[in-house]
Image: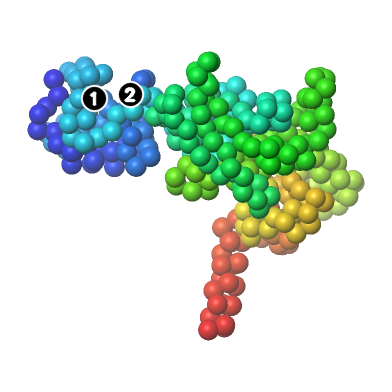
């Protein structure tokens, strides 16, 4: 039975505790969650932690039941209960042709539906990414997709026949997608099999209200072409420490690694924000160099690379400055500090 002296303040402290320490793997909720400030929490776990603040010890979850007992108690304290698992916010989340890397970045393989049918399905596991946990069959929610500096209207609705969540958009956005991947549009239209890997649609949430998403199209074939052109420019390793440079370049030039890095981080320089497509148009679309963030001097041989954390997109200028001094390779934060210092100096000079 839940201790009656646990109040709303104790639950809030339990939420703050969970925000700092995380949810233990075995304490996630399966069906119901508390939704507080757009985050999901397991109800029973919060009550267990709240008891520590109310009575000095974490309450044993076997002493009370989940479901109605827990939900009714928390509802009486003014908390919102939603029908979804708290574990859905552990990333990455993969389902069907979707993969969510974080609360703000998700990717989807461009398929026949997205190119020919003005929309795409949203798997159940991806609903939290779009803030759709409480979506009802009769609901409709409008959003904006920002692509190539243009804004396109789209909306979510339920396919009542098949009980599937769908994201639909209008002809203007469908035409923009067609123009971005004409060869795939033609292949899907002709219902022909393509052995190559299809482009990826990268969604990045651009506001806190789940109403604006920035979209990029990442082409695996273009990644391979970019790598081939880099290799053609650098036929020989001409500097000392060639073995280490080889390992680093190999990680950066692995098409799979580079694709994942761009899916996670996008194609804009993480240091200065330079966007090749905005400056060079179609010639610069999807182009960016990839930097290996782990100093090559920190290991003597090959190591396992995590493209989500070890590889980041940087423009050619920033990349050259990072590596300009062989004895002092700068990290990303040092580069950002250089730019912010110069920006502050310029602001002071202009005053």
Residue toward you, 57 or 345: 345
**Residue 97 at x, y percent in the picture:** 63, 25
Above or below, 214 against 334 in this view is above
Q: Quadrant of the N terminus?
A: top left
Dot 1: element: helix
Residue placed at 64% from the left, 57% from the top? 273
**Circles 1, 2 touching at the beta carbon (< 8 Å):** yes
Q: Is residue 303 visible?
A: no
Above or below, 149 against 226 in this view is below
**Residue 329 at x, y percent in the picture:** 67, 57
Residue placed at 59% from the left, 73% from the top? 342
Instruction: List the residue tagged with mark 1.
Output: 71
Q: Is residue 15 left or right of residue 233?
A: left
**Few, some or many C-alpha atoms within 10 Å of disc 2 (few <14, some 14-19, many ≥20)?**
many
Mark number, residue 336: none
Q: Residue furthest left?
A: 5
Instruction: List the residue tagged with mark 2.
Output: 32
**Which of the 4 quarters of the picture holds residue 30?**
top left
Residue toward you, 287 or 341: 287
Q: How many marks?
A: 2
**Residue 74 at x, y percent in the picture:** 21, 30
**Residue 219 at x, y percent in the picture:** 75, 37
Dot 2: element: loop
> From mark 1 to mark 2, how far is it between C-alphas?
8 Å
Residue toward you, 315 or 112: 112
Residue placed at 28% from the left, 33% from the top? 80
Sooner in the amino-acid sequence: mark 1 or mark 2: 2
**Few, some or many C-alpha atoms within 10 Å of disc 1 (few <14, some 14-19, many ≥20)?**
many
Residue placed at 79% from the left, 25% from the top? 189
């Amino acid at each position: 039975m839940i201790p009656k002296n646990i109040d709303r303040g104790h639950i809030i402290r339990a939420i703050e505790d969970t925000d700092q320490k995380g949810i233990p793997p075995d304490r996630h909720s399966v069906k119901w969650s508390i939704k507080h400030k757009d985050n999901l929490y397991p109800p029973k776990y919060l009550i267990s932690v709240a008891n520590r603040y109310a009575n000095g010890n974490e309450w044993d979850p076997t002493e009370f039941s989940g479901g109605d007992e827990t939900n009714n108690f928390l509802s009486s304290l003014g908390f919102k209960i939603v029908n979804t698992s708290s574990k859905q916010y552990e990333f990455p989340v993969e389902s069907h042709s979707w993969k969510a890397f974080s609360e703000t970045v998700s990717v989807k393989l461009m398929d026949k539906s997205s190119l020919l049918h003005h929309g795409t399905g949203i798997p159940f596991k991806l609903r939290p990414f779009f803030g759709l946990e409480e979506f009802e069959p009769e609901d409709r929610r409008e959003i904006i997709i920002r692509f190539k500096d243009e804004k396109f209207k789209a909306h979510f609705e339920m396919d009542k026949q098949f009980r599937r969540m769908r994201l639909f958009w209008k002809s203007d956005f469908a035409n923009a997608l067609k123009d971005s991947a004409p060869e795939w549009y033609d292949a899907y239209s002709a219902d022909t099999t393509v052995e190559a890997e299809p482009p990826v649609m990268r969604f990045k949430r651009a506001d806190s209200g789940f109403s604006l998403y920035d979209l990029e199209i990442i082409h695996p074939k273009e990644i391979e072409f970019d790598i081939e052109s880099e290799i053609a420019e650098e036929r020989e390793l001409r500097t000392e420490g060639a073995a280490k440079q080889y390992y680093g370049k190999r990680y950066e030039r692995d098409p799979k690694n580079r694709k994942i890095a761009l899916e996670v981080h996008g194609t804009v320089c993480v240091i200065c924000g330079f966007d090749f497509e905005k400056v060079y148009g179609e010639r610069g679309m999807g182009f960016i160099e990839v930097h290996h963030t782990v100093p090559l001097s920190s290991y003597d041989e090959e190591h396992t690379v995590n493209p989500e954390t070890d590889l980041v997109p940087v423009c050619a200028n920033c990349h050259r400055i990072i590596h300009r001094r062989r004895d002092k390779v700068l990290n990303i934060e040092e580069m950002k500090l250089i730019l912010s210092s110069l920006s502050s100096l310029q602001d002071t000079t202009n005053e």
